[in-house]
Image (spheres, helix red, strand yellow):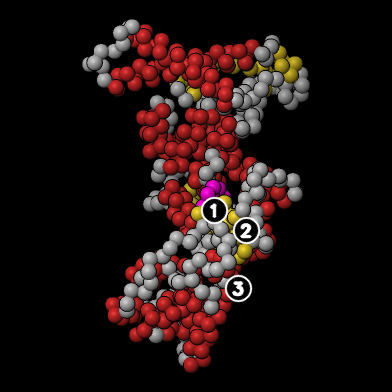
Amino acid sequence: MRIDACGYSPRVLDNVLTVAGELKSFDGASRVVKRLLGVSISGRHVGRLARGIGLEMAAERDAQAARHAAGELPSEVENVPDAVAVEIDGGRLRTRTAGQGPGVHGPAWREDKCASLMRLQSQAVAEDPHPQLPRALAQPEHVRRLVQEVKRLVATPAESTVKEADQTVAEEPPPFPKSKDYRPRPLVRTVVASMAGSDRFGELVAAEAQRRGFYRASRRAFVADGQKCNWTIHQRHFRDFVPIVDFIHAITYIYAAAMAVDPAHGWRLYLEWATACWQGRIAEVLAALRAWTIEHPTPDAPPLANDPHEIVRQALGYLGNNAARMDYPRYRRDGLPVTSTLVESLIKEINYRVKGTEKFWDDPDGAEAILQIRAALLSEDEPLYRFLANRPGNPFTRRSTLAATCQ
Amino acid sequence: MAKRTVSTEELATVRRLARKFGMEVARQAFGDSGPGKDVDLATLESVAQAAAEGVALGTVERMLSQQAEQFGEEQPCPACGRACDLVPRERELVIAHGRVETAEPAAHCPDCRRDFFPSA
């Protein structure tokens, strides 16, 4: 009968946890549950339910990963997907040391990792469907905003230099006609999120990919930024997926380098290099940057902040290390994504719930639990209700985790 | 054991039956001539809501009671296998349309010194 230890039906639990995972706080969830469902439940109790069920979901996910590692996890889909993409990225949230009583003890920033697994609707074609740089990426304000968003990852030129360079843009003609939408359309998305380290996270994502039959798809993409750990996951678990470095990250390095090497004509240089990168000619950009470094040897003194040499060194490192994953014309021909914007947007959706002023999660269980709830809500195959309706019962306490939370 | 799921067709049949019952509820609430023009939609909806809650609670109470009877008078302890007497234990469950009172079968295993609940 699967009667819950707390006496809530699966539908009620689904409603309570949905509200708990969508609103900013458990107290807010308590108020909404009372008003919409007529169920009186304190914010503290909502939090305990979310933690208990979230950890149960994490345990089930871990069991799925173990079955996959043992080669015993069957695919749950009947129709082999045509095109799929796995995109991964990391966010940050704040934690506190667990078991220290009320208040925040040992506050810390920790990284959470997220993966978006999507079936895609797209077509492979013989010719590059969009060889021109997209219109948005040829608009100075838009590009500058993008760079600022990613700038914590990239050394950028001084603000004054950028403004000065942008003044030259007014003289430029409008670069390109409006972009035609050539991008693959995401169909069904499922989400994996965890506080686990990179190695473990890769195993969890691989198991989910296996469950959804991704390894049998005809066209497969693995999209991420250039961080080394992402490509270690690719090598270990997604070796036969086409590796694609997010184009947006690439152009933030290109933009910074263009502004650094020629502040007077930086924007023109950016357009030239970004277009080369878009058209799969990253080798030309690398050659230009290397030529600049030869013409402008690094001074003996330690580099200053926003030193052009340092900016170019970083760009050379990033673009050079990832050059093999930047064959964008081929990816467009194959109907695969060239940016990781969907997972970037997913991170924002997760952050909406887990990140905020005075929001600290117990490390690691509290954070892991809310990530499971949030990931389930952002997945499109209703994993939360499916899980709640099929939870194994415990004849002694009915629910080992919840029994404790309901005292 | 009986099947675990109910088919879409069976659910459609249940929905049709409940709809007929809803028409009877309307007759009970406002008589054969129906609600007057001065009755607003919010009032009509409150009647429908009460009917839906009543149907849901009655349905779940009945089904839980029938399931409880199927456990018989004793059940083996899940840990040691000793047959233990079942006694009904009053319990309130929260479902989507309200709260239902149920007599959940419970047992105590003297060997394991703990209670167990076959309905888990």
Mark positioned earlier in the residue sequence (3 or 1): 1
> Which quarter shows the C terminus of chain B?
top right
Which residue was labeled with disc 3?
A: A324
Instruction: Of the two numbered discs 3 and 2 on the same chain, state the one appearing first in sequence.
Output: 2
Residue at 57% of width from left, 15% of height from top? B63
From the top left corner, tell me how far across and down residue A27 is, in percent: 39, 38
Is the residue at mark 1 from the same chain as the one at mark 2?
yes
User: Hey, which residue is sitting farthest bottom in the picture?
Assistant: A295
Q: Which amino acid does label 3 sit on?
A: Ala
Both on one chain, marks 3 and 1? Answer: yes
Distance from Cα at disc 3 to Cα at disc 1: 25 Å
- Bounds of the magenta segment: A186-195
Q: Which residue is drawn at 67% across and 15% down?
A: B71
Residue at mark 2: chain: A
Query: What kind of secondary structure does the magenta stretch mostly adopt?
Result: strand
The residue nearer to you, when weighing A362 against B72, is B72
Instruction: Name the spot of residue A243 as percent of width and height, x first.
Output: 60, 65
Query: What label sits on residue A121 in the rendered view?
Result: 1
x then y, percent, for residue A255:
43, 76
Q: Dot 2: what SS?
A: strand
Determine which quarter of the picture holds residue A215.
Answer: bottom right
Would residue A292 be counted in the magenta stretch? no
Judged from the image, the secondary structure of the residue bearing numbered disc 1 is strand
Using residue A215 as the reference point, say whether residue A14 is left or right of it. Answer: left
Quickly name the residue at label 2: A219
